[in-house]
Amino acid sequence: MDFTKLITNVNLINSVHLDPEYRVNSNTGEIDKHPTSEYKGLLIKHLPTQTIIQGSLHKYYHNVNYNDYSFKEIGSSVIDLCNTFELDPQEVKVVNLEFGVNVHLANLVECNKFLNSCLTYKGKKFNYKRFANGARYIELEFQRYVIKIYNKGLQVKNYAPLLGNVLRFEVKGKKSVFLSSYGITTIADLLNPINYLNLLECLKNAFEHIFYNEWTIHPTDLIKSHKELLTNWQNLNYIETLHNEKRNTTYKNEFRAFKELEAKYGANETKNKVWQLIQKKWFELLELDLKTYTKLTDFLGRYSIEKVHQINNLSLGLIQYDFTSVDLCKYLLKISKKKEPLKCIKTHLSIEDQKPNSKFLSAKKIGYNEAHRLRNLDSNPRNKLRYKIEQLINESKNQLFEPEIILTNNQLKELEFWKGSKYYPLENINYGIR
């Protein structure tokens, strides 16, 4: 784990640990609207109604980020941060999170050679970029997340020349909706080891969708249809065109067929071995002992018994058994994903027989008009509130003073529906809470 962006409603501007200042933009000469502070490498921005904390938790704990950063050390970092600034971990939201591992490849494959063999991800070509010292990395950015792979040894060679042939594979969650799908909503969730199994699943899914080719299959050994498949999938333009034309079924079928072809001829063993190293390292960093378990549950118990129960129900198995067991991890992950029965959020009637992401009774059950009414009951309050705020903002554009916007906690919660999107009406706006 490395870069993190946190948001809390607690005002830290008067903290004895901070020395806020208004910074000046060196390019434009403009003074920032809001004061900022620094604490152990973290940048803290003081807004009128919230505080943004961002930076590397890894550096917060170690001062550097090229060594290992274990689950126990993450827990210590979160507890120290919360204790220092008197924060409730359940009230500090995680909106950005970078997670991954450094693995030493030894003589398996040279890092740069591995990067050269990573060609596409879900049909898209990787972007080849360079760090300030010239070290190369590959990256693909999407709306909700970023995938990044690089030679960590080269990146830090100026101050850690003995690191060696170390590969860094990471995913950065850019949106809270992406992170919440893996169990991470607040920093309290960073103290639950089961959530790290979810993050490992995320890494695995990303790694599996990387099209990696060492070109070790010889066409002379293939039948005609396999030769055609091999020829096509050695052409990056063909792969990208196939994906971009939205022929998803064709792309998925061909990708699966190519993977089967590789497995048949023993190709891509290197990629599989690299993943085994990544998984092994992840388990090592996630080691949980009774002392750490007690420390985490004692801390969380001050704020939430529910959070303690979540750890109690699952984590004791990680202490009593061999945590490096893949089967055990899969079993615990399966248990952790068990959910309450699916119910309509307005009528509270069962919708277990509908799609897993359903929120309301379907039109097939209650008719179109009634289904539409239920959805309006849910969306109308927040839509009307958003339109009212936007109207106040537009009317005040030619006025001397900003509009006075006072919200209740319930209204603030309604507006969080748009947080992180262009429709969020409170971005860079002063407002009060009553």
Image: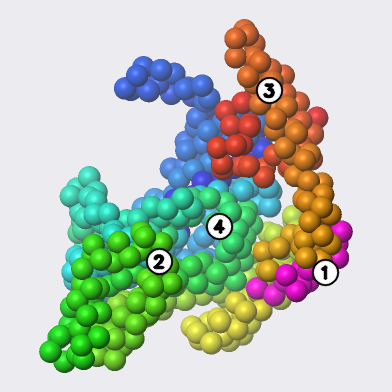
Tag of residue 350: 1
Which disc, if any, is residue 31? none
Q: Which residues are magenta?
A: 337-354
Tell me the CA gap for discs 1 and 3.
39 Å
Q: Which residue is mark 3?
A: 391
Q: Nearer the viewer, residue 93 or 386?
A: 386
Distance of label 3 from label 4 (alpha carbons): 32 Å
- Please report contact status of discs 3 and 4: CB closer than 8 Å, yes or no: no
Give the residue drawn at x 55%, y 57%: 179
In the rendered structure, does residue 414 fall within the stretch colored magenta? no
Which residue has dot 4 on it? Answer: 179
Q: Position of residue 59 (x, y in %)?
A: 41, 51
Query: What is the spatial separation of the Cα atoms under label 3 and label 2, in whole angstroms?
Result: 43 Å
Q: Earlier in the sequence, mark 1 or mark 3?
A: 1
Q: CA distance from mark 1 to mark 2?
A: 36 Å
Secondary structure, mark 3, is: helix
Q: Main secondary structure of the magenta part?
A: loop
The label on residue 247 is 2
